[in-house]
Each structure stands twice: as C-alpha cells, then as structure tokens.
Amino acid sequence: MSTAELANLSDKLMLTTVVMYVVALAAYAVDLGFGRRRAAAAGTASEKAEAKVLVGAAGAETGTKDAGSVAEDADDGEDESQRPQVDWVRLALLVTVLGWGAHLGVIVSRGLSASRWPWGNMYEFLTAITFAAVTAFMVVMFRYKARFLGAFVMAAAVAGLGVANIWLYDSVGPVTPALNSYWIAIHVSAAIIATGAFTVAGAATILYLLKSRAESRGTGTGGILAHVPSAESLDRLAMRVTMFAFPIWTAAIIMGAIWADEAWGRYWGWDPKEIWSFITWIIYAAYLHARSTAGWKGRKAAVLSLLAFAALMFNFFGVNYMFSGLHSYA
C-alpha cells in the first residue's frame, strides 16, 4: 500500500475505533446500572419457583395438591427476568477487544505511512495514550475482575480521541530533526505507558472517593455505586496500578535526560516540560511514600493521588499550549 493509502486507512480505523468505544461505553454503563440487578432478580425468581415446587411436593404427599397443578402454577409465575437477557458485559468485552484491535491498527498504519514512530505530534501522542489506557484497563479487568471501571475508562478514551480528532489532528508528515532518534521509541513509549496506567489509577481513585462518601452517608448500597466494590478495594486497586506505573514514569524521566544531553548538550535545562514531569514524579513519589511509611490510606492518600494526576494532565495539555520551550515541537 502507498503512503497515502496507509494514512487513509489509519483515519478510517480511527472512526471505527471511536464507534466501537462508544458502543462499549454504553454496554458497560448498562451492565453497571442494570446487569447485576437483573441477575439478582433472576436469582430471586429462581428461588420462588423452587419454593413453589417444594410446596407442591408437600401438597402431593398430603393429597391437597397434585403435581400437574404445581407445574402449572410455576409456569404461570415465571418471572420476566428468567427469560433470556442481553449479556451486556460480554458485549462490552467483545466490542472493547474489537475496538482495541482497530486502535492498534490506527497506530501501526500511521507509523507505516510516515515511516517513523507514530507519536511525533500531539494528535499521535494522545492517540497512543488512550490506547495505553484501554490496554491497562483490559489487563486490570482480567486480573482483578474490575469491569466496573469500563464505563469510566471508555468515557475517558472517547473524550481523548474526540479531542485528538477535533482539535489536534495533523496530517501524516515528517517530524523535526530532534525527534528523529531511537530515543523516541524508548523515552516517549515509557511516558505513554505510564500515562495510560495512571489514567486507570485515577479512575479508580475517583470511584473510591465517591464510594467512600456514599458509605459514610449510609447510601453505599444504593444506585450505581452498589455495583462497585468497597471503598477499601478501590483504594487498594488504585495503589497497585500506581505502583506499576511509577517506575515506568521514573525511567521515562531518566531516559529523557539522556536524550536531552545527546540532542541539546545538557541533561537538565529547567524546560517547562521537564519541570512539570518532575513535579508529577515528586507528587506520585510522595503518595507512595506516605502510604508505605506514614500509613496513609483512604481519603488523604486519594487526594494526593488526584493531585498527582492533575499535575500529569497539566504537563500534557497545559504545558504544551501555555508555555514555550524546547519541547514545543510536540
């Protein structure tokens, strides 16, 4: 395929990805709001049917009711929830995997059309970050059964891809000479992976704060929040994902310093991007340190985690558009 054909394929796959993620978002939301409720209703209906059979059996022994009458009553009392229902979580998982495959195709075809690593501008970088976030969610979902994060992560992915396509889209083309280095495959890739994982940790932290507030008010067993784990479980999940992402972010900063020395002749120059990357690192380090040494957990730790995530988002969006520096090429 020619360069133009590959670029066109990438754009078409992007549309497919967004549609798939929107469908997955809707399926996760329905499962979160109604899926488990229907399962509970089905279980209750099954218990009622079983009770009728037992009562009928007792009646047959005493001669007060025959088996045919019991079966007829059981059929008449069949609950709607016992009938086949849409398995929303399976639909969501299937569409997520299909969307993830299309998303991967976007990145690969974009890279092949440009003959370079496909994260040389803000459009490509945000596309890669959303891919990393969805990948991290899929890993967490299968490892920790955390499908309850699906609606929130998919919402973030759809929003991110929307911003990328509406405001940040850039046609396939060459990058500045500073980015023509093998370090882009190491430094930027590490930053993308860490940011994607931090996004999942941020979603879990926000859910923790909502769940914790509901539990403190005695309303944690009602509404959508009734279908997510306890606040303690969410707090623990956010910490585990952060512990995975933090060393990768650390490596990204170190490798960025090495690349800066090769490209600009110094390891550290107090560039705005360097400063905010380091600020983000400090806050996440403080979060993990406070949890491991000072015994911080719960709301205090969650606030610190969200502060770190806010710094991460500002480092990505705010620094690139509010400040000028050596990283302004992105």
Image (cartoon, rainbow, N blue to C red):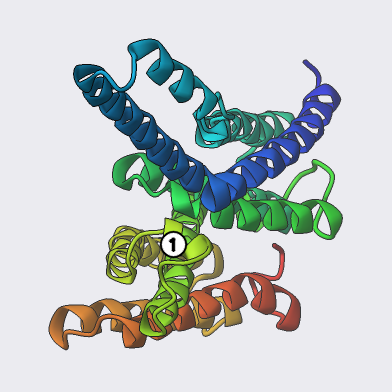
> Considering depth in this image, is 311 or 219 the residue closer to the camera?
219
In the depicted view, which residue is nearer to us: 222 or 109? Answer: 222
| Kind of element beneath mark 1 | helix
Which residue is pictured at 39% across the width and 49% down the height?
146
Horizontally, is 98 left or right of 161 in the view?
left
Q: Which quarter of the picture shows residue 234?
A: bottom left
Q: Report x, y in % for residue 19.
A: 75, 38
The structure residue drawn at horizontal position 66% and vertical position 41%, both measured from the top left corner, is 21
Q: Please tell me how many numbered marks the rendered image carries.
A: 1
The residue that appears at 80% across and 41% down in the rendered structure is: 172
Q: Extreme top residue here?
A: 68
Q: Is residue 47 above or below residue 238?
A: above
Check the image and report above or below for 82 versus 241: above
Across and down, in percent, residue 212 comes to 38, 78
Q: Quadrant of residue 174?
A: top right
Residue at left offset 31%, top offset 33%? 51
